[in-house]
Image: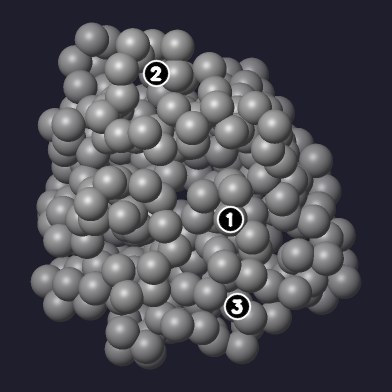
Amino acid sequence: MRDFEKTIISCAVTGAIHTPTMSPHLPITAEEIAAEAIAAAEAGASIVHIHVRDEETGEPVTDLDLFRQVAETVEAECDAIVQPTTGGNPTMPVEERISVVPALEPEMASCNMGSINFGLYQMADAFDEFEYDWEPEHLEASRDNVFRNTFEDLESILPIFDEHGTVPELEVYDVGHLYNAKHLVDRGLLSTPLHIQFVMGIHGGIGASAKNLSHLVDIADDLFGDDYSFSAIGAGRKEFPLGTQAVSMGGHARVGLEDNLFLERGRLAESNAELVEKMVRLTREVAGREIATPDEVREFLGLKGQSETAV
């Protein structure tokens, strides 16, 4: 992998997995999402990963006005790299999910490297009642849903990244997605060096274990040599163990309420900043590494800078 002395901390602020009933601290409105992103940046996150939600019900949406409002607020208040999702909600068509790139021309956006079953239905068993009717329907619908990211989809969206000067962060949910990325590099649809986000612990993707993270890195080393960098997500209770393993291996880590609602067993995180602060502390104490600033990350990943976005 590529060598970078400092650690990149990303924060996924709200996502499309957890629902309002699951935590009162999940940010819903554009104002709340932006405030959480800014606080996460102040705590040490150089990249803030953004989804948006219906401001009345908290349901995941692709509302470009909300994306713009969040991005404008964040960029006005701090120098964090705003990374909108092109994953959106797994039920959304790819044409809807990619629309944020031409709209905002961000420095970086997520880009999913393959299709998977994306099961959320099992999470409903933990709750007897929900605040909104859409929540149990949203979770149950995932029982028969495929999160679609076909080769044809990727062939259509990757040129959009290039056209708008947006660097894709490659979301890899299983080992085969690394081979998909290699295929796209070989065809000239992806440019190296790559920045890969290993998404572990999604029901339908690779399990969140230390052995699996080591395996993913081994395969990426074989396929890409020193032409890639990686970060890791451990969904749920594996957020901090896998984040710590990743930074100890020379990689990077993502935390945030999209991936995990708890600061520790039995204690809900009250903010994204709390999760970032814990990951910063673990990075320094366990791995002995310092935290990269947004501008250091821009230089390392070859990003164009805030002034070149359409925000």
Q: Quadrant of residue 256?
A: top left
Q: Are marks 2 and 3 in contact (CB under 8 Å)?
A: no
Residue extending farthest to the front is 133
In the rendered image, is residue 47 in sight? yes
Residue 3: where, in percent of width, then height?
52, 54
The structure residue drawn at horizontal position 61% and vertical position 88%, both measured from the top left corner, is 163
**Crowdedness near tag 2: few (<14), some (14–19) or many (≥20) residues, C-alpha within 10 Å:** some
Indicate which label's residue lies in the foreground, 3 or 1.
1
Q: CA distance from mark 2 to mark 3?
A: 33 Å
Residue highlighted by disc 2 = 237
Q: Quadrant of residue 84?
A: bottom left
| Disc marking residue 92 | 1
In the rendered image, is residue 75 in sight? no
The structure residue drawn at horizontal position 53% and vertical position 17%, both measured from the top left corner, is 122
Amino acid on which the number 3 mark rests in the picture: Phe
Viewer-closest of 301 and 87 = 87
Q: Does residue 106 sit above or below 48 in this rendering?
A: below
Residue 191: where, in percent of width, then height?
70, 73
Residue highlighted by disc 3 = 161
